[in-house]
Image: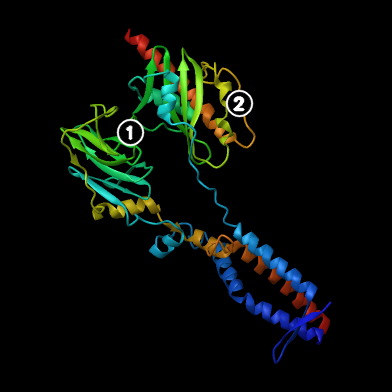
Amino acid sequence: MNKWRLFRTWHRWLGLGITVFVLLLSITGVMLNHAEKLKLNDVTTDADWLMSWYGIDGLSDDAVSFQIDDQWITSGNGWLYLNDKAIATTEGQVIGAVQTDLLVIVASSRKIYLFTHQGEQIEVYTPEGFDAEITAVGLSEGRPVVQAGEMVFKADEDVAIWQPYDGDYVWSESTRFSEAYLSAINQHLRGGGLPFSRVLLDLHSGRFFAASGPLIMDAVAVILVLLNGLGVWLWWARR
Amino acid sequence: MGAQHLSSPHVMLEIPMSIKSKLQMLVCLCLAIFAFANEDEARAEKVFQDPEVFLTEVFDGPVPDPSFLWLISDVKAAAYEILDRNLSGLRQRYWRQGDQTVWILEEIGKTQAITTGISVNDGTIERLQVLIYRESHGWEVRYPFFTDQFRGMSLSSEMELSEQVDGISGATLSVRALTKLARLALLFDGLVRAEGEANE
């Protein structure tokens, strides 16, 4: 086969193959060059599909809330909220929440979280003497009780020591999270949204599409360099 | 060497077998790179000793009821000097018997918390034990060859340990975390004993 025709064919097909990538690189590159003028760092987006793509989700569907008097404890995405305020990160599934005269007590399967009524953290600890994970939390005569395995334990007045208990109690029950605080909670989970420049940079580098995207863009760049050399050589040889 | 031909009505493309096998190798290499492009550190919580078992061991029998050190602003300020971060919570529980105080403390190594039990007797560290380790690297700090060096250490007036801690290559952050916890336990022990003396 005529070698010129062969090289021109390779040049054509390689060029066509990377057209979309070159367009993407060019458009995003020009925009990034003028990022300051276009205020790309100041413009943010919190479109649901984009935040999900980045894995920055809002409150998950399996989030739960517990009403304690006129306040709400919401647990979701590894965070604990008192109304709209993030008060702690959590380990394990949150089982329930109760409120005494002085304290807000939240129980996960392995830990006890103590807060003031204003949401200030007092202590987080793993209670001693439990042979099983916590499965329920409630109140008995103004003091918190928890169930761990077959046994029920009641706390002392400092909520420091738990003793076996066989009296009456009322368990905390979960409800769907309160919509009133959803917007504020999502704002906390998602931050202020993504700067547009971040999205453009990730598109430009290929990182937007996959962790291996930059390698693909590197390959496109290599092909572009080859096409450049091949094109110049084809022109030079034929002039 | 033979060659294969990919043909269309318009194009005859010759690919020698040696180049084809090299291309195949290149594709495999690329796939391997892509496969490892998303390297993810596996999380694995290792419980080396249950905290309750640790308490039973250090007290050699019944564990006393916990006491509390209230984390007032002065205490938090001193803790900040050691930890380089704000200490959360308003109270820190500990267990005490005579001149011995025992603390279960946590500090983040690289990304995960290391739960550590520290027994302090008469102002010096009696025992330091890694109880729960949650990271995939650096767990060598749990071994006695590392933790034993904390025995006998006290806290200087500058809130530093009385002796140098020998690190472990590849576990720098875990070593740093445990060193901070040792200092913190000694600080807390000093405050508790000072409080006790003031109340006498």
- The residue sitting at the bottom extreme is B9
Q: Amino acid at mark 2?
A: Phe
Q: Is residue A121 visible?
A: yes
Residue A210: name its quadrant.
Answer: bottom right
- Same subunit, labels 2 and 1: the answer reads no
Q: Is residue A118 visible?
A: no
Residue holding disc 1: A130
What percent of the width, then of the height, locates residue A17? 63, 77
Q: Residues within 10 Å of mark 2 (few under 14, many from 20)?
A: few
What percent of the width, then of the height, locates residue A221? 67, 67
Q: Give the structural element (helix, strand or loop) at label 1.
A: loop
What percent of the width, then of the height, locates residue B76? 40, 26
Horizontal relation, residue A102 to residue B173: left or right: left
Q: Chain of mark 1?
A: A
**Residue B145's disc number:** 2
Residue A15: name its quadrant.
Answer: bottom right
Which residue is at 59% across, 61% downward? A212
Q: Amino acid at mark 1?
A: Phe
Q: Chain of mark 2?
A: B
Along the line of sight, the residue nearer the viewer: B154 or B127: B127
Task: Count how many numbered circles sit on residues in the image.
Answer: 2
Along the line of sight, the residue nearer the viewer: B9 or B158: B9
In this rendering, the answer to whether B41 lies above or below B171 is below
